[in-house]
Every structure is written in structure tokens, then in C-alpha cells.
Amino acid sequence: MEDPLVELKELDAERDRKQVNYEKMKEKKAALEEQLSALPPKEEIEKDFQEAQQKKAALQRSTGKLRNECGRLVHEFNELRDDAKKVEGKLARLQDEKRQRKDRFFRHNPDTQKAYDWLEANRKEFRQDVFGPGKSCCVDIAEVINVTNVAGFRIYTSPSCGSY
């Protein structure tokens, strides 16, 4: 007989728990319904959602355009950098050619080398910048430093004496 009484007490306890749980759920439902009533209507939410999707699509398009522009600019920058490297290489080659030409000229005209060195060493003593002596001055300087190839001296030291 104890068995049925224990079972009955357990059933009563279970029923009480279910009742408490039911009351809690009922309160939650009322709170959710109150929150739901405070929300805007479903149609308004759907309208806002559609507007947001349209803005998102517009932003994605503009982002795509910006990415394309950025890619184009990066490509252009890389091309300009490559061009700059080519120009630097060409400049180095030209400077090397200029040096080689000068060395070759001085090898064949050692007196002209002396004149060039003297001008470089005494450049600061001139009243103006020295780009090389003029036609009449070439001969005088060449005679002072014993340059045997006066024509070569003129050609090398001054654009006004001739071209190198």
C-alpha cells in the first residue's frame, strides 16, 4: 500500500512542478507578446529589410568599382616603378659610357688629363662656375700646362670649344 501512496505523492509533486513551469511560461509568453506589440509591423520591417538589401547591393557595386580602380592604380604604379628602374639602368649605363669615353680620351691624351685635373682642382678659385674655358682661353691654358693636343683639350673641356 505504500507504493501507491508514494506514487501519488510523486505525481502530486510532478503536477506542482508542471504547474509552476506553466505559470513561468505564461509570464514569458505575456512578456514576449508585450515586446512583440512594441515592435513595428511586419510589413514595415520587410520594407526596411528590402531598403537595407538595396543599400548593400549599391555598396557592393561601389566597392567593386573601388577595387577595380585600386587594382588599376597598383598596376600603373608597378609599370611606373618598372619604367623608373629602366631609366635608372639607362642612366647608369650612359654615365658608365660617359666615364668610359672620358677614360678612353684621357688614355690617348694624357696632357688633356692634366688640364682636366687642374680645372677640377682649381674650380673654386674661378669667379664663376667653370664649365670649361672658352676658345681663346683654351690655347692659353693648354700652353701653360704643356698640352700638346690643343684641339682635343678644346673638345673635352668646353662646349664652346667644340663638342665631345
Image (cartoon, rainbow, N blue to C red):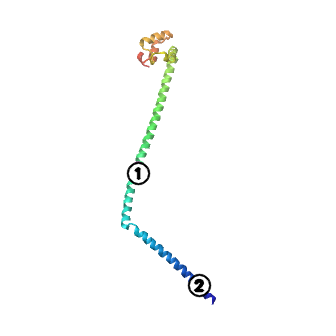
Up-down relation of residue 20 to residue 45 (above or below): below
Residue 139 position within the rendered picture, expressed as x and y whole percent measured from the top left: 45, 10
Q: Amino acid at mark 2?
A: Lys
Q: Residue at x 40, y 46 (%)?
A: 69
Q: Nearer the viewer, residue 136 or 149?
A: 136
Q: Nearer the viewer, residue 91 or 30?
A: 30
Label 1 and label 2: CA atoms lie apart by 69 Å
Secondary structure beneath label 2: helix
Image height of 159 relative to 77, above or below: above
Determine which quarter of the picture holds residue 162.
top left
**Callout 1: helix, strand or loop?**
helix
Q: Is 61 a magenta residue?
A: yes
Tag 2 residue = 9
Q: Quadrant of the N terminus?
A: bottom right
Q: Residue at left 48%, top 29%?
A: 93
Circle 1 or circle 2, nearest the eye: 2
The kind of residue tagged 1 is Thr
Specify the quadrant that holds the C terminus.
top left
Q: Residues within 10 Å of mark 1 (few under 14, many from 20)?
A: few
Question: What is the crowding at mark 2: few (fewer than 14 residues within 10 Å), some, or many (at least 20)?
Answer: few
Numbered label attached to residue 138? none
The answer to which of marks 1 and 2 sits earlier in the sequence is: 2
Percent of width and height locating residue 134: 42, 14
Q: Answer yes or no: is residue 152 visible.
A: no
Image coords of residue 44 (percent x, y): 36, 65
According to the image, label 1 marks what residue?
63
Q: Which residues are magenta?
A: 60-66
Residue 102 at x, y = what percent? 49, 21
Q: Residue at x 50, y 77 (%)?
A: 23
Q: Is residue 142 visible?
A: yes
Task: Count the numbered circles shown.
Answer: 2
63 magenta-colored = yes
